[in-house]
Image (cartoon, rainbow, N blue to C red):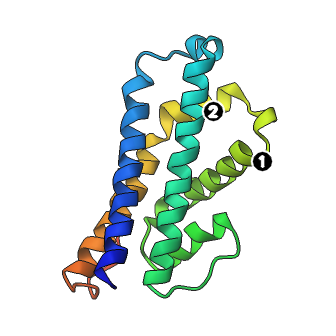
């Protein structure tokens, strides 16, 4: 893989980690009541989750290109293709598929957002986003070290 593409993917991973950290900073202070009442915090959380999911899809599509994997049919299929190739922890595939569906709701059905569902993702699913960032970073590190014959990524958390 060309070094500039590694740099682009690493920059996207860093942005993803930044989004996760921004959300984690709010987790303890934003109760469900605060989430429902404070439209600025609610919109910040929704938008930051959205951009984090976009980063995952961007990283995923770039990894698919670099690794010369099959072209995905849709956003959910990005995660399937990565898991099939061993670039994502397969034990989290269903979660990643739900993330892609959630991204579509944020983008296309934003008028129908369920506050409880969004708040639940904000409180309980950030580790899944972090697992994605970790898996992508491991792939880049293995590729950069010329160790692509190592076993696929697995993540146990």
Is 153 located above or below residue 94 in the figure? below
Q: Nearer the viewer, residue 104 or 132?
A: 104
Position of 45 relative to 33 (above/below): below
Q: CA distance from mark 1 to mark 2?
A: 15 Å
Q: Which residue is at a point 76% across and 38% down the rendered structure image?
A: 110
Closest to the observer, 136 or 7: 7
**For numbered disc 1, what is the local secondary structure?**
helix
Residue 118 numbered tag = 2
Q: Tag 2's secondary structure?
A: helix
In the image shown, does 82 or 92 lie closer to the viewer? Answer: 82
Which residue is under mark 1? Answer: 108
**Residue 140, x across and y down, in percent:** 30, 72
Q: Can I make out residue 83 in this image?
A: no
Between discs 1 and 2, the one toward the N terminus: 1
Label disc, if present, on residue 70 of the rendered structure: none
Residue found 60% across the figure and 34% down from its top: 46
Which residue ends up furthest to the left in the rendered image? 145
Q: Nearer the viewer, mark 1 or mark 2?
A: 1
Q: Residue furthest front?
A: 4
Q: Is residue 142 left or right of residue 79?
A: left
Question: Callout 2 environment at 10 Å: few (<14), some (14 to 19), or many (20+)?
Answer: some
């Amino acid at each position: 893989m060309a070094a500039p593409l590694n740099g682009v993917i690493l920059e996207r991973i860093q942005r993803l980690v930044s989004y996760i950290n921004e959300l984690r900073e709010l987790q303890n202070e934003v109760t469900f009541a605060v989430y429902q009442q404070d439209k600025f915090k609610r919109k910040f959380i929704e938008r930051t989750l959205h951009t984090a999911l976009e980063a995952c899809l961007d990283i995923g599509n770039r990894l698919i290109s670099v690794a010369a994997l099959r072209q995905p049919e849709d956003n959910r299929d990005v995660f399937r293709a990565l898991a099939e190739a061993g670039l994502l922890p397969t034990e989290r595939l269903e979660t990643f598929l739900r993330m892609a569906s959630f991204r579509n709701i944020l983008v296309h059905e934003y008028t129908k957002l369920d506050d409880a569902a969004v708040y639940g993702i904000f409180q309980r699913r950030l580790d899944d986003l972090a697992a994605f960032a970790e898996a992508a970073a491991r792939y880049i590190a293995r590729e950069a070290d010329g160790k692509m014959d190592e076993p696929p990524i697995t993540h146990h958390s």
